[in-house]
Amino acid sequence: MNGISLVMATIGRFEEVRRFIQCLHVQANRGLELIVVDQNRDDRLVPVLAKVPEMGIALRHIRQAEPNLCLARNTGLANASMDVVGFPDDDCWYEPETLDLVMERLSMRDAPSGVVIRWAEQDLREQPAYTLDFAKWRAFREVNASSITLFYRTDLFRSIGGFDPALGLHSWFGGAEETDLMFRVLARGATVVYLPDALVHHTYGIPPHQSVAAAFRYSRRRGRGTGGIYAKHKLSALVIGRGLSAPVVRSLLNINQPRVAASYLGTSLGRLEGYLRWRMRESA
């Protein structure tokens, strides 16, 4: 394998992009290509991106006028020249050995089609590497597989058509594009392994200044994507019922934290809306 193409869709950020580029500078793996799909209306990224070729990393800077995360990633995928592709967010960063570990695992004799690395701030469990199970994935009983944790062989990714633009940031459904992607990859019979020793960092959470109403709106919008997944992949009534009711229970358990409680309620409502909206799309 000749290396990794990293496709970063970005809008509105600068310091975070600079931090990501700095993390690439210390990567052990040198077979890197950074493809930045820039959705900004200004040239804020030009100075920091100018440093990338100086680090010995190939750079492709692509402009995209329409903000849409999945379309941006698919544009980057179409321009990828390496055998492996990953999709870092513009506010995440890797440990120095992360990409080397990814390439090492994909080069082993069993030749998996992809790996899921560990999101350090979210997945705190101590568990060994293992192969993902499709049945568990359909039951939402598998490891978290956010897009920042996913690395696939580029030819596989292209063969399934990339990300679904109906999902993800800047779409009505607002999220779950990486979940949908994993459904389609595993349905192909592809082997995807969890690699806990390779770490990606990404801080997240409800900002302390965010209002109760804003927390509700954000979670509602993001929840629509998961609801769409329920319908698109025809999941069982048990999985759907659990996915709708669990956030309500969590909301009640956090009633003394209004923003947290509102966030859980927004998730439940969003999932219901997303499920119904996708069903309407299919019947239209």
Image: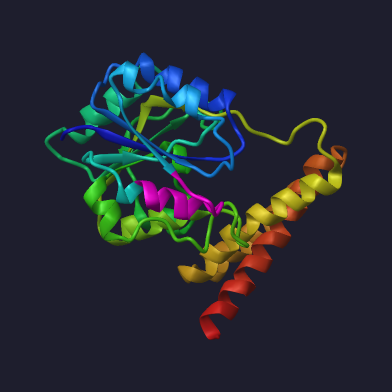
Residue found at the far bottom of this picture: 284
- Quarter assignment of residue 281: bottom right
Number of numbered labels in the structure image: 0
Q: Where is residue 7? Give x, y as percent.
A: 39, 40
Q: Is residue 148 left or right of residue 204?
A: left
Q: Where is residue 96? Give x, y as percent.
A: 37, 16
Q: Is residue 52 visible to us here?
A: yes
Q: Nearer the viewer, residue 126 or 179?
A: 179
Residue 64 included in the magenta stretch of the image: yes
Residue sitting at x 63%, y 74%: 276
Q: Where is residue 49? Give x, y as percent.
A: 44, 26
Q: Is residue 68 left or right of residue 23?
A: right
- Quarter assignment of residue 257: top right
Quadrant containing the C terminus in the rendered view: bottom right
Q: Nearer the viewer, residue 263 or 235?
A: 263
Residue 89 included in the magenta stretch of the image: no
Q: Where is residue 200? Give x, y as percent.
A: 45, 27
Residue sitting at x 45%, y 68%: 233
Q: Is residue 143 visible to us here?
A: no
- Quarter assignment of residue 137: bottom left
Magenta stretch bounds: 63-76
